[in-house]
Image: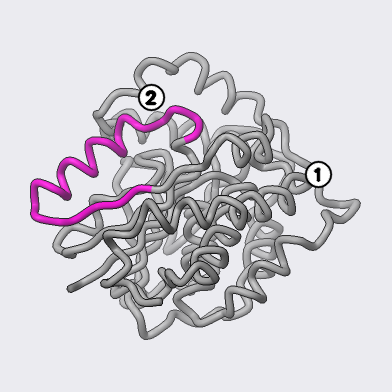
Amino acid sequence: MTYALVLGGGGVTGIAWETGLLRGLREAGLDLTGADLIVGTSAGSVVGAQVATGVPLDDMYLRQLTPAGAKEKPPDLGPLADFFAARAGTLKSQVRPTAEVLAWIGGQARAASVKVTEATRLEVISGRLPVHEWPDRRLVVTAIDTADGALAAWDRWSGVPLPLAVASSCAVPWVYPPVTINGRRYMDGGARSATNADLAAGHELVVILAPSAGLGLTGVLEAEVAELREGGAHVEVVGPDQPAMEAFGPNPLDPARRARSAEAGMAQAPAAAEALAAARGHVGG
């Protein structure tokens, strides 16, 4: 059975929760890391790149427990929060933003005044990736072209360095600058979908870890799951439980919440392993 692991976006707390959850699931006898395909969006691209390049889960988890340094301050969500508030209703719909809407967001992202440079962000993302070369395993990292709203599904054949691809996937509009690749500028793949799970089409089993599900942004995800199931896939979705949501706090980009979010993922893992019982025989132990 072909198996895809989809890792969704959710900020630094999402990185931590996914990491803790994956480690906890492995300890519960359910190792999700052997997927034929890993799809990573934003936070999920950071986790997915590490998993696909063979970074041990124990090492990944310990990195999340490291206390935030004095220089690690949570960015002001400002205009991004205003955008979410204004579109609260449409964000719950089952329709992805059109290319025109994504291009509008991209224009806003290019024009936004942010406090960090592209070079600084690339340095930060590179520091989160112990391995900078694309793996032999199939890894897809999502981003959005800010000019035309087109989806970029970076992989080892795209000719884009892995840290640059991940940085583009993590370029949250209004918060971080778009990332320049081959003369074009790219932003967070989560602008299209928090999971981009449709890229797992054709696999018989799809397991989706979705930190953003706790925020109620499930409309597009539900549509993606329905589409995958119509195509014959068995689909399992895991979102954060209430303790995990409390660990995330109000700002998913707050590094001070990283350790407790990782621990919340670990704590949720036994229940998640039970919920994923149907997948156990296909993803390894």
x then y, percent, for residue 230:
9, 46
Give the residue at x 35% y 81%: 137
Residue 221 part of the magenta segment = yes
Residue pointed to by mark 2 = 91
228 is higher (above) or lower (below) than 133:
above
Give the residue at x 36% y 67%: 38
Which of disc 1 and disc 2 is earlier in sequence?
Answer: 1
94 is higher (above) or lower (below) than 28:
above
User: Does residue 207 appear left or right of residue 249 in this picture?
Assistant: left
**Mark 1: amino acid:** Lys
x then y, percent, for residue 147:
37, 42
Give the residue at x 68% y 54%: 263
Residue pointed to by mark 1 = 73
Q: Is residue 187 visible?
A: no
User: Does residue 38 appear left or right of residue 187 in this picture?
Assistant: left
Between 96 and 260, the one lying in front of the other is: 260
Give the residue at x 52% y 16%: 85
Residue 11 part of the magenta segment = no
x then y, percent, for residue 273:
43, 58
Examine the image and state in which quarter residue 35 appears: bottom left
**Residue lying at the far bottom of the rendered structure:** 136
Q: Which residues are magenta?
A: 214-237
Q: Residues within 10 Å of mark 2 (few under 14, many from 20)?
A: some
Q: What's the CA distance linking mark 2 and mark 1?
A: 27 Å
Tag 2 secondary structure: helix
Between 226 and 103, the one lying in front of the other is: 226
